[in-house]
Image (tube, helix red, strand yellow):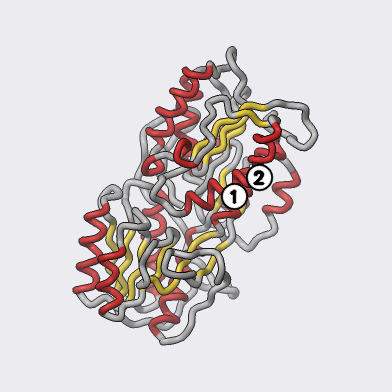
Amino acid sequence: MKKILASILASAMVFSLSACGSSAPAESSNAAPAASTAPAASAAPADESGSPSTVAGGGKIGVSMPTQSLQRWNQDGTNMKAELEAAGYEVDLQYAGDNDIPTQVSQLENMISSGCDALVVASIDGSALTEVLKGAKDAGIPVIAYDRLIMNSDAVSYYATFDNYKVGTIQGNYIKDALDLDNAEGPFNIELFTGAPDDNNVNFFFGGAMDVLNPYIESGKLVVLSGQTEKAQCATPNWSAEESQKRMENLITSNGYGPEGTRLDAVLCSNDSTAYGVQNALIAAGYTPENMPIITGQDCDKPNVKNIVAGYQDMSVFKDTRTLASQVVKMVDAVMQGSEPEINDTETYDNGTGVIPSYLCDPVVCTVDNYKELLIDSGYYTEADVA
Protein backbone atom coordinates (compact mmCIF):
# COMPACT_ATOMS: atom_id res chain seq x y z
CA MET A 1 0.00 0.00 0.00
CA LYS A 2 2.71 2.43 0.98
CA LYS A 3 4.46 2.81 -2.32
CA ILE A 4 6.59 5.70 -3.43
CA LEU A 5 5.52 6.55 -6.90
CA ALA A 6 7.89 7.30 -9.70
CA SER A 7 5.40 9.56 -11.41
CA ILE A 8 5.31 12.01 -8.51
CA LEU A 9 9.05 11.99 -8.04
CA ALA A 10 9.65 12.47 -11.73
CA SER A 11 7.57 15.61 -11.81
CA ALA A 12 8.84 16.85 -8.47
CA MET A 13 12.49 16.54 -9.40
CA VAL A 14 12.16 19.14 -12.16
CA PHE A 15 13.11 22.07 -10.00
CA SER A 16 15.86 24.49 -9.01
CA LEU A 17 15.90 23.86 -5.28
CA SER A 18 13.31 26.42 -4.44
CA ALA A 19 10.41 25.72 -2.36
CA CYS A 20 3.90 27.48 6.18
CA GLY A 21 3.86 27.37 8.84
CA SER A 22 4.84 24.66 10.88
CA SER A 23 5.70 23.54 14.36
CA ALA A 24 8.70 21.31 14.72
CA PRO A 25 8.43 18.14 16.73
CA ALA A 26 11.40 16.87 18.65
CA GLU A 27 14.41 15.06 17.34
CA SER A 28 13.53 11.40 17.04
CA SER A 29 14.75 8.12 15.72
CA ASN A 30 11.69 5.90 15.50
CA ALA A 31 9.27 7.04 18.17
CA ALA A 32 7.75 10.13 19.67
CA PRO A 33 9.78 12.63 21.68
CA ALA A 34 9.05 16.24 22.72
CA ALA A 35 9.38 19.38 20.59
CA SER A 36 12.70 20.87 19.53
CA THR A 37 13.35 24.55 18.98
CA ALA A 38 16.91 24.46 17.69
CA PRO A 39 17.33 26.09 14.28
CA ALA A 40 18.79 23.91 11.58
CA ALA A 41 22.15 24.46 10.00
CA SER A 42 21.83 25.87 6.52
CA ALA A 43 24.14 27.20 3.88
CA ALA A 44 24.00 30.73 2.55
CA PRO A 45 22.20 30.90 -0.77
CA ALA A 46 24.39 31.36 -3.80
CA ASP A 47 24.05 33.20 -7.06
CA GLU A 48 24.54 31.49 -10.42
CA SER A 49 28.33 31.64 -10.05
CA GLY A 50 28.17 29.72 -6.78
CA SER A 51 29.14 32.72 -4.64
CA PRO A 52 26.95 33.98 -1.78
CA SER A 53 24.33 36.37 -3.12
CA THR A 54 24.72 40.05 -2.26
CA VAL A 55 22.92 43.22 -3.17
CA ALA A 56 23.64 46.82 -2.31
CA GLY A 57 21.86 47.84 0.87
CA GLY A 58 21.66 50.57 3.47
CA GLY A 59 18.94 51.26 6.03
CA LYS A 60 17.18 49.56 8.89
CA ILE A 61 14.84 46.63 8.26
CA GLY A 62 12.41 45.30 10.84
CA VAL A 63 11.79 41.56 10.63
CA SER A 64 8.88 40.19 12.66
CA MET A 65 8.61 36.41 13.09
CA PRO A 66 5.75 34.68 14.91
CA THR A 67 7.56 32.35 17.32
CA GLN A 68 10.91 30.88 18.31
CA SER A 69 9.36 27.63 19.52
CA LEU A 70 9.07 26.21 16.01
CA GLN A 71 12.03 25.00 13.96
CA ARG A 72 10.78 26.48 10.71
CA TRP A 73 10.55 30.08 11.96
CA ASN A 74 13.98 29.92 13.61
CA GLN A 75 15.41 28.96 10.23
CA ASP A 76 13.50 31.73 8.45
CA GLY A 77 14.59 34.40 10.91
CA THR A 78 18.23 33.29 10.90
CA ASN A 79 18.39 33.16 7.10
CA MET A 80 16.64 36.49 6.71
CA LYS A 81 18.89 38.32 9.18
CA ALA A 82 22.08 36.88 7.68
CA GLU A 83 21.07 37.76 4.11
CA LEU A 84 19.94 41.28 4.94
CA GLU A 85 23.10 42.01 6.92
CA ALA A 86 25.23 40.61 4.09
CA ALA A 87 23.38 43.01 1.80
CA GLY A 88 24.37 45.95 4.00
CA TYR A 89 21.24 46.49 6.08
CA GLU A 90 20.83 46.92 9.81
CA VAL A 91 18.32 44.31 10.99
CA ASP A 92 15.89 44.39 13.90
CA LEU A 93 14.78 40.73 14.12
CA GLN A 94 12.14 39.96 16.74
CA TYR A 95 10.10 36.87 17.59
CA ALA A 96 6.62 37.31 19.09
CA GLY A 97 6.97 34.98 22.06
CA ASP A 98 5.11 31.76 21.39
CA ASN A 99 2.66 33.03 18.77
CA ASP A 100 1.53 35.88 21.02
CA ILE A 101 -0.43 38.42 18.99
CA PRO A 102 -0.17 41.37 21.46
CA THR A 103 3.60 40.84 21.56
CA GLN A 104 3.83 40.97 17.77
CA VAL A 105 1.71 44.12 17.68
CA SER A 106 3.89 45.78 20.32
CA GLN A 107 7.09 44.80 18.53
CA LEU A 108 5.80 46.23 15.26
CA GLU A 109 4.84 49.47 17.00
CA ASN A 110 8.41 49.72 18.29
CA MET A 111 9.88 48.97 14.87
CA ILE A 112 7.75 51.72 13.33
CA SER A 113 8.58 54.28 16.03
CA SER A 114 12.29 53.43 16.03
CA GLY A 115 12.68 54.40 12.40
CA CYS A 116 12.74 51.15 10.45
CA ASP A 117 12.82 51.85 6.73
CA ALA A 118 10.92 48.68 5.74
CA LEU A 119 9.12 45.85 7.50
CA VAL A 120 9.10 42.13 6.73
CA VAL A 121 6.27 40.49 8.66
CA ALA A 122 5.30 36.84 9.13
CA SER A 123 2.00 37.32 10.89
CA ILE A 124 0.58 35.12 13.64
CA ASP A 125 -2.98 36.01 12.77
CA GLY A 126 -3.40 37.38 9.28
CA SER A 127 -6.27 39.64 10.40
CA ALA A 128 -4.80 41.03 13.63
CA LEU A 129 -2.34 43.59 12.28
CA THR A 130 -4.65 46.02 10.46
CA GLU A 131 -4.46 48.78 13.06
CA VAL A 132 -0.75 48.64 13.85
CA LEU A 133 0.19 48.68 10.17
CA LYS A 134 -1.76 51.90 9.67
CA GLY A 135 1.18 53.46 11.50
CA ALA A 136 3.58 52.01 8.97
CA LYS A 137 1.57 53.39 6.07
CA ASP A 138 1.31 56.82 7.70
CA ALA A 139 5.09 56.82 8.16
CA GLY A 140 5.69 55.75 4.56
CA ILE A 141 7.23 52.44 5.60
CA PRO A 142 6.72 49.67 3.01
CA VAL A 143 5.52 46.31 4.34
CA ILE A 144 6.34 42.93 2.82
CA ALA A 145 4.17 40.07 4.05
CA TYR A 146 6.36 37.02 4.56
CA ASP A 147 4.87 33.58 3.81
CA ARG A 148 1.55 34.44 5.50
CA LEU A 149 -0.65 37.03 3.85
CA ILE A 150 -1.63 39.95 6.07
CA MET A 151 -5.33 40.51 5.64
CA ASN A 152 -7.44 43.67 5.50
CA SER A 153 -4.52 46.08 5.39
CA ASP A 154 -3.72 48.46 2.55
CA ALA A 155 -0.28 48.95 4.10
CA VAL A 156 0.96 45.70 2.53
CA SER A 157 3.08 46.45 -0.52
CA TYR A 158 4.18 42.95 -1.53
CA TYR A 159 3.86 39.32 -0.54
CA ALA A 160 6.55 36.63 -0.72
CA THR A 161 5.62 33.00 -0.17
CA PHE A 162 5.61 29.56 -1.72
CA ASP A 163 2.97 28.32 -4.12
CA ASN A 164 0.75 27.16 -1.30
CA TYR A 165 -2.04 25.83 -3.48
CA LYS A 166 0.55 23.66 -5.19
CA VAL A 167 1.65 22.37 -1.77
CA GLY A 168 -1.86 21.04 -1.26
CA THR A 169 -2.15 19.54 -4.72
CA ILE A 170 1.21 17.78 -4.28
CA GLN A 171 -0.09 16.19 -1.08
CA GLY A 172 -3.43 15.26 -2.59
CA ASN A 173 -1.86 13.79 -5.70
CA TYR A 174 0.59 11.79 -3.61
CA ILE A 175 -2.30 10.11 -1.80
CA LYS A 176 -4.21 9.64 -5.05
CA ASP A 177 -1.28 7.92 -6.73
CA ALA A 178 -0.12 5.95 -3.70
CA LEU A 179 -3.59 4.42 -3.32
CA ASP A 180 -3.99 4.15 -7.10
CA LEU A 181 -7.42 5.72 -6.76
CA ASP A 182 -8.06 5.79 -10.49
CA ASN A 183 -7.67 2.01 -10.80
CA ALA A 184 -7.99 0.30 -7.41
CA GLU A 185 -11.40 -0.90 -6.30
CA GLY A 186 -11.39 0.56 -2.78
CA PRO A 187 -12.99 1.94 -0.78
CA PHE A 188 -10.15 3.43 1.26
CA ASN A 189 -10.46 5.10 4.66
CA ILE A 190 -8.85 8.52 5.12
CA GLU A 191 -8.80 11.24 7.78
CA LEU A 192 -7.93 14.90 7.22
CA PHE A 193 -5.76 17.29 9.23
CA THR A 194 -4.89 20.89 8.41
CA GLY A 195 -3.42 23.81 10.34
CA ALA A 196 -4.30 26.93 12.27
CA PRO A 197 -7.69 28.37 11.34
CA ASP A 198 -6.31 31.93 11.53
CA ASP A 199 -3.50 31.18 9.04
CA ASN A 200 -4.62 32.28 5.58
CA ASN A 201 -2.28 29.70 4.02
CA VAL A 202 -4.56 26.92 5.28
CA ASN A 203 -7.10 27.95 2.67
CA PHE A 204 -4.57 27.10 -0.02
CA PHE A 205 -2.97 24.02 1.57
CA PHE A 206 -6.26 22.37 2.44
CA GLY A 207 -8.07 23.72 -0.61
CA GLY A 208 -5.45 22.40 -3.01
CA ALA A 209 -5.44 18.94 -1.44
CA MET A 210 -9.22 18.72 -1.31
CA ASP A 211 -9.56 19.78 -4.93
CA VAL A 212 -7.67 16.57 -5.71
CA LEU A 213 -9.34 14.31 -3.13
CA ASN A 214 -12.94 15.53 -3.09
CA PRO A 215 -14.01 13.76 -6.29
CA TYR A 216 -12.95 10.45 -4.75
CA ILE A 217 -14.72 11.27 -1.49
CA GLU A 218 -17.89 12.16 -3.38
CA SER A 219 -17.73 8.93 -5.40
CA GLY A 220 -17.18 6.80 -2.29
CA LYS A 221 -13.72 5.63 -3.33
CA LEU A 222 -12.36 7.54 -0.32
CA VAL A 223 -14.31 7.37 2.95
CA VAL A 224 -13.87 9.76 5.88
CA LEU A 225 -15.38 7.67 8.68
CA SER A 226 -15.33 10.58 11.13
CA GLY A 227 -17.35 12.68 8.69
CA GLN A 228 -14.95 15.56 9.38
CA THR A 229 -14.23 17.04 5.97
CA GLU A 230 -14.71 20.78 6.48
CA LYS A 231 -11.73 23.02 7.12
CA ALA A 232 -13.00 24.08 10.55
CA GLN A 233 -13.44 20.44 11.58
CA CYS A 234 -9.93 19.51 10.43
CA ALA A 235 -8.10 22.60 11.74
CA THR A 236 -5.27 22.36 14.27
CA PRO A 237 -4.78 25.40 16.54
CA ASN A 238 -1.27 26.85 16.22
CA TRP A 239 -0.29 23.90 14.01
CA SER A 240 0.29 22.09 17.29
CA ALA A 241 1.57 18.51 17.24
CA GLU A 242 -0.03 18.02 20.65
CA GLU A 243 -3.43 19.11 19.35
CA SER A 244 -3.23 16.90 16.26
CA GLN A 245 -2.20 13.98 18.46
CA LYS A 246 -5.23 14.50 20.71
CA ARG A 247 -7.57 14.65 17.75
CA MET A 248 -6.07 11.53 16.18
CA GLU A 249 -6.40 9.70 19.50
CA ASN A 250 -10.08 10.64 19.55
CA LEU A 251 -10.53 9.43 15.98
CA ILE A 252 -8.84 6.14 16.81
CA THR A 253 -11.19 5.64 19.74
CA SER A 254 -14.39 6.71 18.01
CA ASN A 255 -13.79 4.86 14.74
CA GLY A 256 -11.93 1.81 15.99
CA TYR A 257 -8.81 2.41 13.89
CA GLY A 258 -5.96 0.04 14.63
CA PRO A 259 -3.68 -2.61 13.15
CA GLU A 260 -6.19 -5.23 14.25
CA GLY A 261 -9.23 -2.99 13.96
CA THR A 262 -10.71 -0.69 11.33
CA ARG A 263 -8.29 -0.15 8.47
CA LEU A 264 -6.93 3.38 8.05
CA ASP A 265 -5.34 3.82 4.64
CA ALA A 266 -4.22 7.44 4.61
CA VAL A 267 -4.06 10.63 6.68
CA LEU A 268 -3.78 13.94 4.89
CA CYS A 269 -1.65 16.22 7.07
CA SER A 270 -1.03 19.75 5.85
CA ASN A 271 2.36 20.04 7.55
CA ASP A 272 4.96 18.13 9.52
CA SER A 273 3.88 19.12 13.02
CA THR A 274 0.35 17.87 12.47
CA ALA A 275 1.80 14.76 10.83
CA TYR A 276 4.06 14.19 13.83
CA GLY A 277 1.19 14.34 16.27
CA VAL A 278 -0.80 11.91 14.12
CA GLN A 279 2.16 9.53 14.04
CA ASN A 280 2.52 9.69 17.82
CA ALA A 281 -1.11 8.65 18.25
CA LEU A 282 -0.86 5.86 15.69
CA ILE A 283 2.38 4.50 17.17
CA ALA A 284 0.74 4.42 20.60
CA ALA A 285 -2.15 2.47 19.03
CA GLY A 286 0.27 -0.19 17.80
CA TYR A 287 1.07 0.92 14.26
CA THR A 288 4.53 0.18 12.87
CA PRO A 289 6.32 1.20 9.67
CA GLU A 290 4.94 -1.96 8.07
CA ASN A 291 1.27 -1.06 8.57
CA MET A 292 1.32 2.73 9.01
CA PRO A 293 -1.20 4.51 6.76
CA ILE A 294 0.08 6.90 4.10
CA ILE A 295 0.91 10.18 5.86
CA THR A 296 1.74 13.46 4.14
CA GLY A 297 3.55 16.50 5.53
CA GLN A 298 5.20 19.81 4.73
CA ASP A 299 8.41 21.64 5.68
CA CYS A 300 10.85 18.71 6.01
CA ASP A 301 11.34 19.25 9.73
CA LYS A 302 14.28 17.19 10.94
CA PRO A 303 12.29 14.74 13.10
CA ASN A 304 9.89 14.14 10.23
CA VAL A 305 12.72 13.50 7.79
CA LYS A 306 14.00 10.92 10.25
CA ASN A 307 10.56 9.35 10.33
CA ILE A 308 10.39 9.33 6.54
CA VAL A 309 13.62 7.36 6.53
CA ALA A 310 12.29 5.06 9.27
CA GLY A 311 8.99 4.47 7.46
CA TYR A 312 6.57 6.33 9.73
CA GLN A 313 5.83 9.10 7.23
CA ASP A 314 5.67 8.86 3.45
CA MET A 315 6.45 12.33 2.22
CA SER A 316 6.92 15.97 3.10
CA VAL A 317 6.77 19.02 0.87
CA PHE A 318 10.12 20.82 0.87
CA LYS A 319 10.07 24.61 0.90
CA ASP A 320 13.63 25.92 0.84
CA THR A 321 13.54 28.87 3.21
CA ARG A 322 16.93 30.01 1.90
CA THR A 323 15.30 30.66 -1.47
CA LEU A 324 12.44 32.59 0.11
CA ALA A 325 14.82 34.66 2.23
CA SER A 326 16.90 35.50 -0.84
CA GLN A 327 13.82 36.59 -2.73
CA VAL A 328 12.66 38.82 0.11
CA VAL A 329 16.10 40.44 0.34
CA LYS A 330 15.83 41.23 -3.37
CA MET A 331 12.35 42.66 -2.73
CA VAL A 332 13.61 44.79 0.13
CA ASP A 333 16.53 46.06 -1.92
CA ALA A 334 14.30 46.98 -4.86
CA VAL A 335 11.88 48.83 -2.60
CA MET A 336 14.70 50.65 -0.85
CA GLN A 337 16.15 51.64 -4.21
CA GLY A 338 12.77 52.96 -5.33
CA SER A 339 12.27 50.35 -8.03
CA GLU A 340 9.75 47.56 -8.58
CA PRO A 341 10.70 44.14 -7.16
CA GLU A 342 10.38 40.97 -9.18
CA ILE A 343 6.92 39.41 -8.90
CA ASN A 344 5.33 36.43 -10.62
CA ASP A 345 1.72 36.51 -9.41
CA THR A 346 -0.75 39.39 -9.69
CA GLU A 347 -4.01 37.46 -9.44
CA THR A 348 -4.11 35.01 -6.54
CA TYR A 349 -3.70 36.80 -3.22
CA ASP A 350 -6.43 39.32 -2.37
CA ASN A 351 -6.11 40.46 1.24
CA GLY A 352 -9.46 42.22 1.35
CA THR A 353 -8.12 45.56 0.14
CA GLY A 354 -7.05 44.32 -3.27
CA VAL A 355 -4.70 41.83 -4.90
CA ILE A 356 -1.20 42.00 -3.41
CA PRO A 357 1.66 41.66 -5.94
CA SER A 358 3.41 38.43 -4.97
CA TYR A 359 6.41 36.24 -5.62
CA LEU A 360 5.75 32.51 -5.31
CA CYS A 361 8.64 30.11 -4.78
CA ASP A 362 8.23 26.52 -5.89
CA PRO A 363 7.64 23.62 -3.45
CA VAL A 364 8.82 20.08 -4.21
CA VAL A 365 8.10 16.62 -2.83
CA CYS A 366 10.57 14.89 -0.50
CA THR A 367 10.54 11.13 0.08
CA VAL A 368 12.93 8.46 1.25
CA ASP A 369 14.11 8.18 -2.35
CA ASN A 370 15.32 11.75 -2.81
CA TYR A 371 15.81 13.30 0.66
CA LYS A 372 19.61 13.00 0.49
CA GLU A 373 19.87 14.88 -2.79
CA LEU A 374 17.23 17.41 -1.80
CA LEU A 375 18.29 18.15 1.78
CA ILE A 376 21.82 16.85 2.43
CA ASP A 377 23.61 17.43 -0.87
CA SER A 378 22.11 20.92 -1.10
CA GLY A 379 23.52 21.86 2.33
CA TYR A 380 20.11 22.47 3.89
CA TYR A 381 20.84 19.81 6.52
CA THR A 382 23.87 17.74 7.44
CA GLU A 383 23.85 13.96 7.64
CA ALA A 384 23.99 14.29 11.43
CA ASP A 385 20.84 16.44 11.48
CA VAL A 386 18.69 13.59 10.18
CA ALA A 387 20.76 10.54 11.19
Q: Name the residue: 59% across, 17% down.
A: 262
Q: Can residue 149 be seen at all in this image of the molecule?
A: yes
Whether label 2 touches label 1, CB < 8 Å: yes
Residue 375 location in percent, x, y? Answer: 56, 51
Please tell me the numbered disc located at residue 265.
none
Q: As displayed, is residue 120 above or below residue 41?
A: below
Residue 238 location in percent, x, y? Answer: 37, 44
Classify mark 1: residues with Cα within 10 Å, few (<14), some (14-19) or many (20+): many
Task: State the image quarter where residue 308 is shown.
Answer: top right
Q: Name the residue: 32% across, 46% down.
A: 69
- Distance (Cα) linking label 2 and label 1: 7 Å
Report which residue position mark 2 lands on: 212
Q: Can residue 384 be seen at all in this image of the molecule?
A: no
Extreme residue in the right direction: 183
Q: Decide if residue 285 is on the left or right side of residue 108.
A: right
Amino acid type, callout 2: Val
Task: State the image quarter where residue 352 is shown.
Answer: bottom left
Please tell me the numbered disc located at residue 208.
1
SS at mark 2 in the image: helix
Q: As displayed, is residue 296 above or below residue 31?
A: below
